[in-house]
Amino acid sequence: MIESITTLVTSLGSGFYLLLPVNLLLLVFAPVIVDYLAGEELEEPGRDFRINTLRVLNLLVALILIIGLLSGNSLSANNLVLKLLLALMIVYFSILLTHFGSKLIRKRYGRRVQSQDAERIADTYASRALSISAGVFISIVALISIIRLFGFENLLEAGGVIGFIGVFLALTQAAWAPDIIGGLVILNTRMFEERDVIRLDIGNQEMIARVYRTRAFHTELLNLIDNHRVMIRNSKMRDYAVHNLSKFATAKGLRESLHFNIGYNVEPGRVRAMFEEVFQRATTRSELKFEHQHEPEVRMQDAGDHAVAWSFHYYTKDADSITALRQGFREIILETCIEWGIDLSTPLTLSHNPGSAARSFESMADESGLYSATSAFPGSEKKE
């Protein structure tokens, strides 16, 4: 294949140098090419990197063409200028072919999702696996073609560059293989997808975030509390307990719970009446997006040493406003409890029996024989 391409290029003669203006056109229209092949809205860093990569290759091709023109060397199959040009062309078109193949695969096997301002195609298990396989295949073919172009066929042997690459990948697989496999597992299980709101249990903390995108090595999340972007490795995501708040178990929606400790001096009926008034007040506030048609559930969770643990349950189908909804309900509950004279602070129960400490110490001293009651409590001598 390489020999046929070389023969074709050398047969063009002077037309070969028409590559210079064509190359300059490709350099100018690099942003258009990247936007077309991407098939989706790229972020600025990724888009700029692709554009700069293509432009660097274009500049290298232009530089080698100019050197060849100035040197006046004739084109032949053994010409170094020709080999360098063909090598850069192979790299350039391999990149274009990889991106174009990924676009076709994503369009065929991807999943359409509605973003904030437009519809886009997200990766699925099939599209991600096929894109990775296609990219690896094209890269191997390009590498072998470049090696054969320069006549280094001995590097294709087991102990050559292919063997070195294989050993390198084997030694570094612990750094990249778990994340790629983890990303494929996440896409295949579909436990959570783009635009879903999830809750992560990270140690003793929890994070509520929206899934922005699942990439090859990491998952990008939008933290709904702190309003910033978070990147977590795909292998690490599988170690956390992930709660998908956008997928409900019943038609009522997501069942949210708020927990409070109320003292034993407040009757249960009064507590239930207070929470019912809280629910009625919440229905008058339009910014609180919850299911008004479903009555609240008030449950006694535990009877502790100092207070009774109560839980207040309500339903919502707007997972994006979970944080604001919790804050709004807590504010209304605090205002209502102040009006009703119900204290939300956990009471502290103390039991004090005068003299019990002295008797306990005296009995311990008698048993040990080390101290007498007289030495421990001056003035409390025993009478015989």
Image: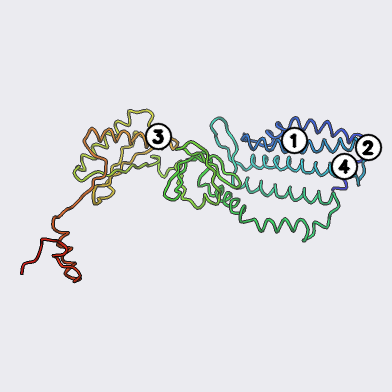
Instruction: Characterize the local packing of mark 1: few (<14), some (14-19) or many (20 or more) Cα atoms within 10 angstroms.
Output: many
Indicate the position of residue 118 as horizontal and vertical percent values.
57, 31
Which element carries disc 4, helix, strand or loop? helix
Disc 4 to disc 1, C-alpha distance: 19 Å
Does residue 215 appear left or right of residue 271 in this picture? right
Q: Mark 3 points at which residue?
A: 324
Disc 3 to disc 2, C-alpha distance: 73 Å
> Which comes before the other along the chain, label 3 or label 4?
4
Does residue 124 appear left or right of residue 338 in this picture? right
> Which comes before the other along the chain, label 1 or label 3?
1
> Disc 3 or disc 2, which is closer to the eye?
2
Q: Which amino acid does label 4 sit on?
A: Val
Which element carries disc 2, helix, strand or loop? loop
> Which comes before the other along the chain, label 3 or label 2?
2
Which element carries disc 3, helix, strand or loop? helix
Q: Name the residue under label 2.
A: 72
Indicate the position of residue 229 as horizontal and vertical percent values.
52, 39
Instruction: Characterize the local packing of mark 2: few (<14), some (14-19) or many (20 or more) Cα atoms within 10 angstroms.
Output: few
Does residue 339 appear left or right of residue 247 in this picture? left
Q: Mark 4 points at which residue?
A: 81
Seen from this angle, which residue lies furthest left?
Answer: 384
Indicate the position of residue 343 as horizontal and vertical percent values.
24, 39
Disc 4 to disc 2, C-alpha distance: 11 Å
Q: Is residue 3 above or below residue 293?
A: below
Instruction: Characterize the local packing of mark 4: few (<14), some (14-19) or many (20 or more) Cα atoms within 10 angstroms.
Output: many
Q: What residue type is labelled 2?
A: Gly
Disc 3 to disc 4, C-alpha distance: 65 Å
Q: What residue type is labelled 3?
A: Ala
In this view, the residue in front, 269 or 42, is 42
Disc 1 to disc 3, C-alpha distance: 47 Å
Q: Name the residue under label 1.
A: 55
